[in-house]
Amino acid sequence: MRQILSSCSASISELKKNPTALLNEAEGAPIAILNHNVPAAYLIPAETYEWLMDKLEDVELAQIVRDRAGEKSQAIEIDLDDL
């Protein structure tokens, strides 16, 4: 059985009946949507999703910085006044 990563859960039938009520009841917390008592999806508020996407982008950019820091020996030094 898969772990449910949320303190709130609802069936797909409950989701179909009144998704807004589920979101209001969860008060911003993620909701595990269950199909035969197995998580099929997680429902999160739009603000939470946007925050997660920002964090994911930050992680990806940090990895690019770490990768490029290893290439420092290949860098060409310039003076900002020359730009």
Image: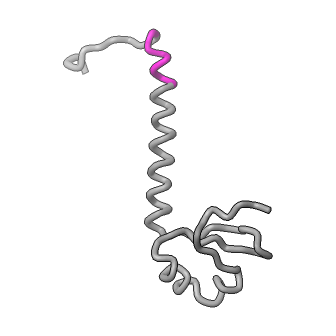
Residue sitting at 70 percent across and 80 percent down?
12
- Of 50 and 38, which appears nearest the observer? 38
Judged from this view, the residue extending furthest toward the bottom is 17
Residue sitting at x 46%, y 76%: 27
Could you tell me residue 72's position as x and y percent? 44, 14
Answer with left or right where residue 3 lies relative to residue 50: right
Q: Is residue 47 left or right of residue 17?
A: left
Position in image of residue 62 (x %, y %): 46, 34
Quick check: 38 above or below 66? below
Measuring 30% from the left and 13% from the top, which residue is drawn there?
78
Looking at the image, the residue that sits furthest to the top is 73
Q: Nearer the viewer, residue 25 or 13?
A: 25
Give the total of numbered labels: 0
Q: Is residue 10 above or below residue 30?
A: below
64 lies above or below 26: above
Q: Is residue 72 magenta?
A: yes
Quadrant in which the C terminus is drawn: top left
**Left-right relation of 34 to 46:** right
Q: Is residue 65 inside the magenta stretch?
A: no
Q: Main secondary structure of the magenta part?
A: helix
Image x and y of residue 36, in percent: 80, 76
Quadrant assignment, res 58: top left
In the picture, the quarter occupied by the N terminus is: bottom right
- Residue closer to the observer: 74 or 65: 65
- What kind of colouring is applied to the model shown? one colour
Residue 54, percent from left and from top:
44, 51
**Magenta-colored span:** 67-73
